[in-house]
Image: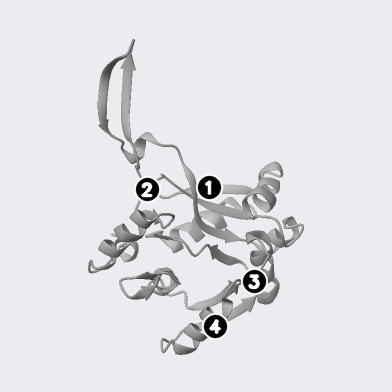
């Protein structure tokens, strides 16, 4: 619920989906979930939004499992509440449906946070800003999941990453969709301030698929 340009980041995140015609949401809540419940009641958009109180100690695996149980047997998009991206959801879904595995993760390149320093025998030979393409791929937090993924979540108190995703990897059931476009997490105050600047653009980069 951290505000980005006067709106909760959750609102910006949901707009990524709405802008691509996906308007049905299930939100897993925990600590201070009543704040999200009250906020949902104020929405006047034509969206279907359900909140599920999944417990204070529940980890991401348990929250995703609860949402999937509520939806009851449907393929779903899933994402966290702390990152924005202009992921082409239809392209992501098409990729998922064509490979036929149980789950797809969106792979992104992490934002460049540090400069590059190369040296030889103590002499600096290169000093420059780090480019995103210098980095590998990381989990961007946008998934497509088949109903069977719920069976890979063993208990509510395990993270989705170290639990279900690791098991899917062992079973060769996880594929990666490489997203080269905009992606920005909100893990630090600096990143929040960057998102504030982006949010003032028209459209903000997470809504710009071109």
Question: Is residue 63 at least partly visible in the picture?
Answer: yes
Q: Check if mark 4's residue and mark 3's residue have beta carbons within 8 Å.
A: no
Distance in Å between CA atoms under marks 1 and 4: 33 Å
Q: Check the image and report above or below for 103 versus 17.
A: above
Which mark's residue is nearer the viewer, 4 or 3?
Answer: 4
In the image, 175 versus 86, the foreground residue is 86
Q: Residue at x 32, y 17 (%)?
A: 119
Q: Work out whether mark 3 precedes mark 1 in sequence or the reverse, and give the earlier one.
A: 3
Q: Check if mark 1's residue and mark 4's residue have beta carbons within 8 Å.
A: no
Which mark's residue is nearer the viewer, 4 or 2?
Answer: 4
Q: Work out whether mark 2 precedes mark 3 in sequence or the reverse, and give the earlier one.
A: 3
Q: Which mark is residue 176?
A: 1
Q: Residues within 10 Å of mark 2 (few under 14, many from 20)?
A: some
Q: Residues within 10 Å of mark 1 (few under 14, many from 20)?
A: some
Q: Work out whether mark 4 precedes mark 2 in sequence or the reverse, and give the earlier one.
A: 4
Q: Residue at x 71, y 45 (%)?
A: 171
Q: Residue at x 41, y 45 (%)?
A: 110
Q: Name the quadrant of the C terminus.
A: bottom left
Q: Check if mark 2's residue and mark 3's residue have beta carbons within 8 Å.
A: no
């Amino acid at each position: 619920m951290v505000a980005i340009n006067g709106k909760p980041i959750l609102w910006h995140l949901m707009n990524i989906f709405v802008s691509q015609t996906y308007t049905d949401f299930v939100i897993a809540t925990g600590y201070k979930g009543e704040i999200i419940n009250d906020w949902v009641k104020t929405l006047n958009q034509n969206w279907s939004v359900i909140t599920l109180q999944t417990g204070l100690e529940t980890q991401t695996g348990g929250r995703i499992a609860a949402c999937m149980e509520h939806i009851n047997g449907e393929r779903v998009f899933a994402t966290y509440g702390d990152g924005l991206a202009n992921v082409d959801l239809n392209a992501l879904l098409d990729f998922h449906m064509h490979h036929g595995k149980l789950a797809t993760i969106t792979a992104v390149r992490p934002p460049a946070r540090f400069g590059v320093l190369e040296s030889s025998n103590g002499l600096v030979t290169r000093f420059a800003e780090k480019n995103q393409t210098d980095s590998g791929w990381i989990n961007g937090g946008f998934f497509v999941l088949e109903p069977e993924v719920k069976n890979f979540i063993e208990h509510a108190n395990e993270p989705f990453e170290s639990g279900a995703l690791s098991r899917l990897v062992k079973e060769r059931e996880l594929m990666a969709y490489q997203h080269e476009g905009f992606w920005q997490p909100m893990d630090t105050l600096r990143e929040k301030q960057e998102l504030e600047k982006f949010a003032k653009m028209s459209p903000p980069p997470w809504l710009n698929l071109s």
